[in-house]
Image: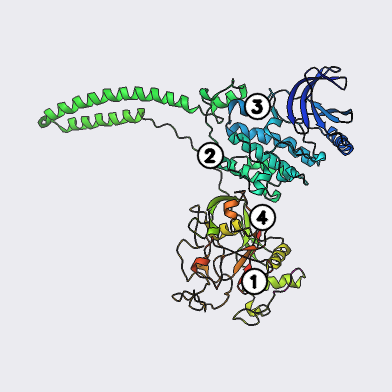
Amino acid sequence: MPLLPGELLNTRYRIVSLLAEGAHGATYRAFDVKNEQAFAIKELLDPSLATQKAFRAEARRLTRLSHPQLPAVRDHFSLDGISQYLVTEFVEGVSLQDLLDQYGVLPSHLLVPWLQAVCRPLAYLHEQGQLHLNIKPANLRLTPAGDLFLVDTGLPGLRLPHARGFDSPEQQALKETTAVSDIYSLGATLYTLLTGQTPPPALKRESGLDELIPARDVNPDVEPYLSIVASRAMSLRPDARYESVPDFAQALNPPAGKLVRTPTIAPQQRSAPILPAVAAAAATNGNGWKPLRWRGRYLEMRVIGGLSLLLFLLIGLSVAVAYVNTNERFRTEDQVAATATMESAVIAALTAIADTPTPEPEPSATPEPTPAPLIDEATGMRMLYVPAGSFRMGREDGENNEQPARFVALDSFYIDQTEVTNGQYRLCVAAGACSPPASPNATYHSAYYNSSQYDNYPVIFVNWYMARDFCAWRGARLPTEAEWEKAAGFNPQTGTRQLYPWGNEFDGVRLNFCDVNCTLAKRSPQFNDGHRDTAPVGSYPDGRSPLGMYDMSGNVMEWVNDWYDARYYRQATTDTNPMGPAEGSFKSIRGGSWLSDPDEVTTTRRFSYDPTVARANLGFRCAASPP
């Protein structure tokens, strides 16, 4: 049972009210009768000696912290060997959970600055090597002065789970937590404030018992970019979340050139008086514009007045026309000119009263030039830039493992313009960082790997681990499935993903595939691509992807980083920088090869192999995040 109002704690702290209660204790508002000051007291109910020792160590660490948006720790003590108490300054004001309960979902032009403000004390904690691990709307307090405080630490040194839905999966499972565990909680807080709903518990999502519905699907008024930010921050895989709190804060800014227009709060939606800060923001719509309903009333007055004037002018015009028609034979050139002048005057009047308000152009950011290609110093490989943004991944009418198609958002990245060649791979072997291919020969090319004649041909007979090691030697990595598909088919001019790198119709002269030179029954004898086996990289300039990559269809299949699961598209838990299943038995393969038919070389087709497999039609290319 929680402490009751009026109880005196440790002979000096009189309980005023219960602020929150959980499985491990409660938080109270209290009054220090000695110093006549309000405090918040966090209670932990655990009699174990290990917990008491950890609590004292955590309290000492917290006492050393000092930030204007963190309540200072003033005291800590234990009672009866059962309860531990942490005393902090009490922050007057209202929590964001209170505001959510009173008003419902608030506009983003209020939420975004609040969350960016709370990122400052959280970043400070991380700089001090300290986590919070109890971030949720109830622990973000807005003072009467408009300051945002982060309160009620989660006592990270004790490794306790807290509010379900806001804890990261690693925190909920009592595993090691890091700074990105707090970022998960920030994302869950953003999600809750955008939708009015608490996200499902992380471990339920991880086990497949529940799924995270994107914020924009819950609340269609949510800006798409904020829905993506929340989903990425709540990625089940820590390495897929934002790397730091400043990165999360930056992601909350609207995309360049966009203004966030927010609806006003209609009177019938209010369940409590509007706070001054909220009222002021609603009065200007956050951007200096009047609310739409007032603009509508003003427009109605203009229209009524304009229609009255229009009616008067039309009556006068009708009379004039009737008079002219009855006296047609007496019209002179001057009369015709006078009539035209009157018509012009009417048109001018109509133009003056027409509703042609001055447009409110959205400011456009100065276009940024596409970053120049990166040239790998070790191998000379050219890496092309792929811009950040969303694209539709998968194919609704494709194979089962390509369905359903869904929008995913990716950060910008670089990817090799061509497949890795024999000559480049030999440099890694010579450096002692890579193992030689499993076979030096190709199917129809003898002495393939060791002959300088084939230096510019794709390296083959490398398994997934060998491909990974080569990319790591270069300071790069294998691309994810999503990155590979975007590089292969996304057209930035149209904003669509193409079925083949060059378009949506197959063209057998734009790639090296199973054509007339192929011995398989599935060959396409009407085409001759000029090669019976692998071709030199970059042999088909007309088959390049819109972003400039060669041989994304055909030549050799390509390893990517993801583990393979045929059901992954149906079960994916994030639409931001997806990295595939957390584990598996097979690795994903993309792109088709010189042994593939037209259906097997689309930009969406998915295959898989055991990561230890090495084949004569299997190679790879590398990717890298921007430096």
Mark 2–mark 1 distance (CA, rounded to whole Å): 46 Å
* Amino acid type, mark 1: Thr
Q: Nearer the viewer, mark 4 or mark 2?
A: 4
Q: Which residues are magenta?
A: 433-437
Pointers 4 and 3 in contact (C-beta within 8 Å): no
Mark 3 vs mark 2: which is more N-terminal? 3
| Residue to which mark 1 is pinned | 421
Q: Nearer the viewer, mark 3 or mark 2?
A: 3
Report if residue 385 is visible in the image.
no
Under circle 2, the secondary element is loop
* Amino acid type, mark 3: Asp
Please indicate whether residue 501 sits to the left or right of residue 31 in the image: left
Q: Position of residue 69 (x, y in %)?
A: 75, 31
Quarter-of-image position of residue 604: bottom right
Q: Does the magenta run of residues contain 23?
A: no
| Residue to which mark 4 is pinned | 625
Mark 4–mark 3 distance (CA, rounded to whole Å): 40 Å
Mark 3–mark 1 distance (CA, rounded to whole Å): 60 Å
Q: Nearer the viewer, mark 2 or mark 1?
A: 1
Q: Please state, as top left, top right, bottom left or bottom right, where the N terminus lies in the image.
A: top right
| Residue to which mark 3 is pinned | 98
Mark 3 closeness class: few <14, some 14–19, many ≥20 residues within 10 Å: some
